Image: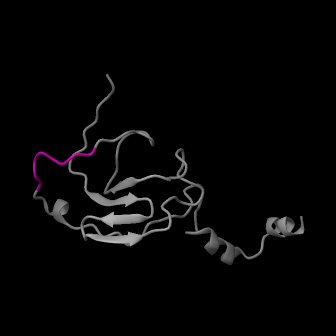
Amino acid sequence: MLPHVDNFHRQVASIWSHTTIFTPCSLTTQVVPFITPMGGFPHYGEVNQDFVMIKGCCMGSKKRVITLRKSLLATFRKKAMEKISLKFIDTSSKYGHGRFQTFEEKKNFLGPLKKDAQKEAA
């Protein structure tokens, strides 16, 4: 039998399907080009399939299967009743000191690089 961990009262921040994010709290849909940070997630890689974003943390390894279900007991705490509004999704690199959100932003800041000049010459 595998170890079993219960997590209670996790709030769903958004549900992502291919290129659309659905936010259940505000019932809005927005198009996001990608969710994977530059260089991928450490020890996981790139996210290419559907995913659910939850508020807080989730115990376990990176690729652990998680079962989500509706709570049997309703919670009436003020913290649990507040609406979640996603304002910013950080896509900077999680390796080292990530400063840039996109490769285009990095290229504009750094300017032409030596490796780019070598590719054009070849």
Q: For the N terminus, which image quadrant?
A: top left
Query: Position of 40 compared to 14: left or right?
Result: right
**Which residue is drawn at the image coordinates 25% and 39% (left, top)?**
6
Total marks placed:
0
- Magenta stretch: includes residue 72: yes
Question: Relative to 121, does residue 17 appear above or below in the rendering?
Answer: above
Q: Main secondary structure of the magenta part?
A: loop
Give the magenta range. Answer: 68-75
- Magenta stretch: includes residue 57: no
* Coordinates of residue 80 in the picture (x, y in percent): 18, 59
Work out whether residue 51 or residue 17 is closer to the camera in this orientation and state it.
Answer: 17
* Coordinates of residue 34 in the picture (x, y in percent): 50, 63
Question: Relative to 59, does residue 99 appear above or below in the rendering?
Answer: below
Query: Position of 74 compared to 63: left or right?
Result: left
Quadrant assignment, res 15 = bottom left
Work out whether residue 70 or residue 101 is closer to the camera in this orientation and state it.
Answer: 70
* Coordinates of residue 28 in the picture (x, y in percent): 30, 72
Q: Residue furthest top?
A: 1
Work out whether residue 24 or residue 37 is closer to the camera in this orientation and state it.
Answer: 24
